[in-house]
Amino acid sequence: MHVCFVAAEAVPFAKVGGLADVVGALPAALRALGHRVTVLLPFHRGIDPRAHSLARRLSPLPVALGPESWPVEIWEARLGTGVEVVLLRPPALFDDRPIYSGGPDDPPRYAVFCRAALEALADRGVPVDVLHVHDWPAALVPYYLARGLRERPALAGARVLLTIHNIAHQPLIDPHQGERLGLHPDDFHPGGFEFYGRINPLKAGLLWADRVTTVSPSYAAEICTPAGGHGLDGVLRGLPRPLVGILNALDTQLWNPAADPHLPHPFSADALEGKAGCKLALQRRLGLEPRPAATLAAVVARLAPQKGIDLVAAVAPQLAAADVQLVVVGDGDEALRAEFERLAAAEPGRLRLVTGFAEPTARLAFAGSDLFLVPSRYEPCGLTQLIAMRYGSVPVARRTGGLADTVLDLDARLETGTGFTFDPIDPAALLAAVQRAVAARADRAAWTRLVRRLMRLDHSWDVPARQYDELYRSLEA
């Protein structure tokens, strides 16, 4: 089958969050199953054509959308995995802006990208079997396909799978822009893409796609409720074929503590000695008291209420009083950043904040920590808890979304389960879970067995890729 991914970001070209990791790794796993895979992305600012061996077509591709036509540059490459990559560069839309600006221009420029992705595939002439589109930036692909582009021979047999990575992200379009973006006024109604008087690209994707998935079974259940659906739960419940949750996974070559170039002391489940060296290196790098016996907890996340970082800030003084060291790596909300800076100044040997995403420090935090805190208010899937387990750091997580599917509460003997969990969105509940973990760590032999067991868990793309393969084949049927 020829499977074409359409997304806003993908490793190694452009990354904001976990979506880039998924679109970077899943195509390679599908290629290993024998599929031909093409990934279509915007040509974002900062992408170096030489670094990625990108070749530009001599002539731009004219892309008509509403009354306008865009001369879109096409850049192409083939990765070492055999995955083909097509980067689309409409003039001025992505050159001088971040991947997501957060402004009203985001939905219109991604509408142009969606149309350009289909035009580029049609122009290449290679028949497409499945269009796998991701989140709101690519959600207009099935709409444009149904409203005229399916007549193109290469797209005639294409089926569309839409994956929701975070349903909270729903930028809207003013109705007066609709026709300029090729959105037909006859489809502007509650049964179409109309959403409280505006145009919702994600809603259009849900309605015009052949099948919809999301990134964990628990999140699939949550977003079908009014509490979790952000206004689209009724649409999801009304889909002709039920929403499916497939867990995300890791690129286990990219995330491998035995071969991670950022670690001063590589280690594995069979040779754990290097983990203690990484802990000492982390403590020394950040100015924490270099004590192997101290419990070291880490957070690597956006400083945002969704991630529950305010809960971590609330319990930080109690953690310090209990001799738990805390490393927070991330940036975001200014008030949360200021609070952690204040806490770090009060406890310089026990708490450090590292702002600006520094990958070497983040990787050392995974490797050098004993505990990894993930107290999210909601979490569609989450990758950091999977990375933490692979690097021998035991998760302490709130039971929600993908965290509920991957972090199972440990028994008293640490023989079953994968972490320490809690339910209430409450600092006291997080503190109690951390205290359970600190107490469990006193049994060094049991703790070491737990760390080895977590590191050996299979969080690769092998199983999820086969699940997507089955879904693709069901679309054909």
Image: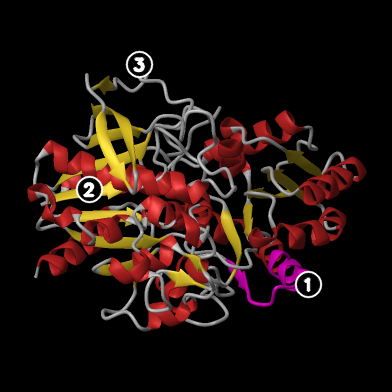
Q: Which callout, 3 or 2, points at the residue further toward the start of the chain?
A: 2
Residue 431 drawn at (x, y percent): 76, 67
* Element assignment for label 3: loop
State the image coordinates of residue 305 (x, y, percent, origin top left): 70, 60
Relative to 112, is 360 on the left or the right? Answer: right
Q: What residue is drawn where x is 85% and y is 60%? A: 318
The part of the chain drawn in magenta is 420-435
Crowding at mark 2 (Cα within 10 Å: few <14, some 14-19, many 20+): many
Could you tell me the amino acid type at mark 1?
Ala
* Furthest-top residue in this view: 50
Q: Nearer the viewer, mark 3 or mark 1?
A: 3
| Circle 3 Cα neighbour tier, 10 Å, few/some/many (<14 / 14–19 / ≥20) | few
Classify mark 1: residues with Cα within 10 Å, few (<14), some (14-19) or many (20+).
Answer: some
Residue indicated by mark 3: 50
Q: Nearer the viewer, residue 208 or 398?
A: 208
Inspect this view and state whether residue 327 appears: yes
First-in-chain label (1 vs 2): 2
User: How far apart, in angstroms, are the residues tagged by discs 3 and 1?
Assistant: 52 Å
Mark 2 lies on a secondary structure that is strand
Residue ID for mark 2:
4
Q: How far is the residue under mark 1 from the one under mark 2? A: 46 Å
On the rendered structure, is 448 left or right of 204? right
Task: Tell me residue 427's x, y (percent).
Answer: 77, 69
Secondary structure under badge 1? Answer: helix
Q: Are marks 1 and 2 in contact (CB under 8 Å)?
A: no
What residue does disc 1 label?
428
